[in-house]
Amino acid sequence: MNEPTDLRRLRGDRTRRAVLDHAVQEASVRGLDALSFGALAEAVPVNKSGIAGLFGSKERLQLAAVERATEIYTEHVIVRARSADRGLARLWALVLAWTEYSRARVFQGGCFFRTVEIEFDMRDGAVHDAVVAAQRSWESYLVHQAQLALDAGELAPGTDPDQVAFEINALLNAANDRSVLLRDDAVYERALAAARALLAAHGADLATLR
């Protein structure tokens, strides 16, 4: 008897997820270019032709990995911060969630997007565009929360939300990079202290930044 279509689709979805969950971990350490059907087949219970059938090309595999990494990132950073009120509280919750996401090595190589941004920054093409889109989405969310904080009077008049988001993102990225390179967990506390000072300089109440 032939396997029902729904069961085949469910099995295919599970296989695809298993491949991608391994792929994003590998890419966070070695980059997206290091991904190959053969190497993945050695690491997951799917043969090379099966993986090729799921993705069709290396570029489609890379794009799928970026999409899966975005889902994981959203779960560990964006969703975890949503319990905080929008504005300054949400902005600070995002800082804390991002720090924990990097510190806990949700991705083995630290932040997946830090690895692939550097890998694809000077390239053109669909993968570069997908990485850019993910980064812009994150940065725009930081800007939005900073703007809401400004509108609510939680930041001083004249504060530039784009600048606040840029500086916060720079601090988080620096903490991730130095932690990975130097194996130094203390950089996260330094980044949090710097982010507090940054927001306080823009009029934020330090009592809310805990």
Image (cartoon, rainbow, N blue to C red):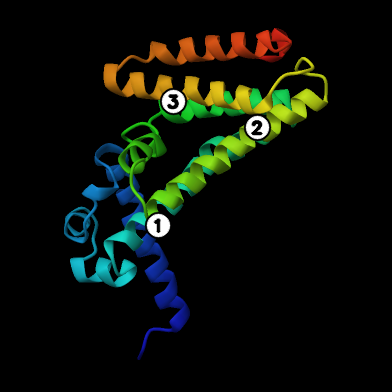
In three-dimensional space, the C-alpha distance between marks 1 and 2, rounded to whole angstroms, equals 25 Å
Query: Residue extending furthest right?
Result: 152
User: Which residue is the site of mark 1?
Assistant: 126
Looking at the rendered structure, which numbered label has been put on residue 143? Answer: 2
Quadrant in which the C terminus appears: top right
Q: Is residue 3 left or right of residue 198?
A: left
Q: Which residue is mark 3?
A: 173
Tell me which numbered mark, 1 or 3, is placed earlier along the sequence: 1
- Considering only vertical position in the picture, is 9 above or below 118? below
Residue 19: percent from left, percent from top: 31, 57
Label 3 element class = helix
Measuring from the top left, give residue 48's x and y in whole percent.
19, 66
Q: Position of residue 164 (x, y in %)?
A: 62, 22
Q: Amino acid at mark 1?
A: Ala
Residue placed most toward the observer, 42 or 163: 163
Q: Secondary structure at mark 2?
A: helix
